[in-house]
Image (cartoon, rainbow, N blue to C red):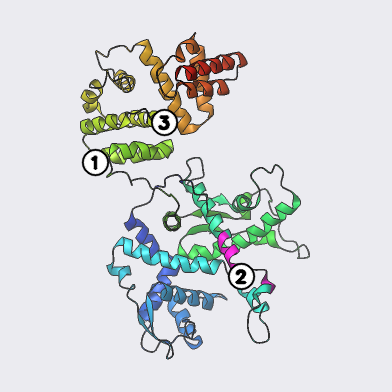
């Protein structure tokens, strides 16, 4: 899984839509059909699986065909038992009855349905970490016991590997600069688990490990697709043909999709987020702040990307009157703590979504040393009359506050470097005035400008100004 730092916020589909998707998944729908079919004559073995003589009837009920038909029916039954759709009444007699959870699939709330699906998901994830059946058979000794040591299989390590892959897939899906709902090439996903971040050209040994991981993931994603976690395009069989095999049609090795493509479904995003939360990770969702105050909105969206922050703010504003919400946002934006500049930036972005009804709230703070600058920006952008011109002191304070907010939001980004260069070019004597600005972040901003500006002379001037600012602040 990802590290413990908060993950980007995800936009979840409505629970009713997700519940419908869960009920439509091949695996859960099969499990439900078997649970309704089971009756007084149904028998299970000692492990809770359908008795061998009843598997043909289950296969026929589900309309399954092919070599894997019995395996798919057995899996669906196992999910039905694990998810509580079927309850074992007498283990010795092997009798069963409908479980308490079965009624939830038709009479429960969307949340109830999703809870059943999450239980089914855990069963399938556990199955996905188990070696192939052929490997298990090959590892059986004379007494029918599996010699796990001969499989080179560590169940904990396998589960951790799959968790890590799914965590990376979740992160790619929810990140604003990721593919979103688009598919991810299987080689890239495997490499994310194998290739060190600081490695330039992967070695042959590393590439072989990536190839092995791809083959494992190919099997695992085939297993995970029927439960609705992912949509998966498997690795092209032609790419896995042995060199001694009869050559077939020419293949295009440059077509990355032939090496496998996977994407999380909206239901899969919901499921992985639930697992992340259960494991103690911070996995926010857009819409969680709509019932909270403006202080929680501004602080909460400070870690969001621009698109997610806007979506969260739009939902928050939709539940409030424009004038009241503007006053609440402005009040929450005040402060001299390190997070205050970014709160004010988020406040300014939120107010850009509010209509002209908010004008009185902005006029009320024109004389506020922390809010007067953004109030003038808002009023001027709307062409409002009689907006007092800002003092030079306010202009410089707002500039420092804006750069401090950008530093906190984006770090040393290209956009911030362009802003720094523009400030130094447009304002002659900028640094000689900027170090005097009475703002808690003045020294930090000037140090950042010295670090980011490509002109050595300008950068040196910025660093000198930062030293003066720090001395003035007593640091």
Which stretch is magenta? 150-160
Picture coordinates of residue 431 (x, y %)?
Answer: 49, 13
Residue 236: in sight, yes or no? no
Q: Is there a contact, CB below 8 Å, between mark 1 and mark 3?
A: no
- The magenta stretch spans residue 151: yes
Q: Is residue 253 above or below residue 377?
A: below
Give the residue pinned by disc 1. Answer: 319
Left or right: 237, with 171 as reference point: right
Q: Nearer the viewer, residue 115 or 447?
A: 447
Does residue 216 appear in this view? Answer: yes
Expressed as whole percent of the image width and height from the top left, the position of residue 296 reads 32, 40
Residue 281 in picture, x, y percent from top left: 45, 52
Which image quadrant for residue 93? Answer: bottom left
Mark 2 and mark 1: span between their CA atoms?
51 Å
Judging by the rendered image, the residue that carries numbered circle 2 is 131
Secondary structure state at the residue bearing disc 3: loop
């Amino acid at each position: 899984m990802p590290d413990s730092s908060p993950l980007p916020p995800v936009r979840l589909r409505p629970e009713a839509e997700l519940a419908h998707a869960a009920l439509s998944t091949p695996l859960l729908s099969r499990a439900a059909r078997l649970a309704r079919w089971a009756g007084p004559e149904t028998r299970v073995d000692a492990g809770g699986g359908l008795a061998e003589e009843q598997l043909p009837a289950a296969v026929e009920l589900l309309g399954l065909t092919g070599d894997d038909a019995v395996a798919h029916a057995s899996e669906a039954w196992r999910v039905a038992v694990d998810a509580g759709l079927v309850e074992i009444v007498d283990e010795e007699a092997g009798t069963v009855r409908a479980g308490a959870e079965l009624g939830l699939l038709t009479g429960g709330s969307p949340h109830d349905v999703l809870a059943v699906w999450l239980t089914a998901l855990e069963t399938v994830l556990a199955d996905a970490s188990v070696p192939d059946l052929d490997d298990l058979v090959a590892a059986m000794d004379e007494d029918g016991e599996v010699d796990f040591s001969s499989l080179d299989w560590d169940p904990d390590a396998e589960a951790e590997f799959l968790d890590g892959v799914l965590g990376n897939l979740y992160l790619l899906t929810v990140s604003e600069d990721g593919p979103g709902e688009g598919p991810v090439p299987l080689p890239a996903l495997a490499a994310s688990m194998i290739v060190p971040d600081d490695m330039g050209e992967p070695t042959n040994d590393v590439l072989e490990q990536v190839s092995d991981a791809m083959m494992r993931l190919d099997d695992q994603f085939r297993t995970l697709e029927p439960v609705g976690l992912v949509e998966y395009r498997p690795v092209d069989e032609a790419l896995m043909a042995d060199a001694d095999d009869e050559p077939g049609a020419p293949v295009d090795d440059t077509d990355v999709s032939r090496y496998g493509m996977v994407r999380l479904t909206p239901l899969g995003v919901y499921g992985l987020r639930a697992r992340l939360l259960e494991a103690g990770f911070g996995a926010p969702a857009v819409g969680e702040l709509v019932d909270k105050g403006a202080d929680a909105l501004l602080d909460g969206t400070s870690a969001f990307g621009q698109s997610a922050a806007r979506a969260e703010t739009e939902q928050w504003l939709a539940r409030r009157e424009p004038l009241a919400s503007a006053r609440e946002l402005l009040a929450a934006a005040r402060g001299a703590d390190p997070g205050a500049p970014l709160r004010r930036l988020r406040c300014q972005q939120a107010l850009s979504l509010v209509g002209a009804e908010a004008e009185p709230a902005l006029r009320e703070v024109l004389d506020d040393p922390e809010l007067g600058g953004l109030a003038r920006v808002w009023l001027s952008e709307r062409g409002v009359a009689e907006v007092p011109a800002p003092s030079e002191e306010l202009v410089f304070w707002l500039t420092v506050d804006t750069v401090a907010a950008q530093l906190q939001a984006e770090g040393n980004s290209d956009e911030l470097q362009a802003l720094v260069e523009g400030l130094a070019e447009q304002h002659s004597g900028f640094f000689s005035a900027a170090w005097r600005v009475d703002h808690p972040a003045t020294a930090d901003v000037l140090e950042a400008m010295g670090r980011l500006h490509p002109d050595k002379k300008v950068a040196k001037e910025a660093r000198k100004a930062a030293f003066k600012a720090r001395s003035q602040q007593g640091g």
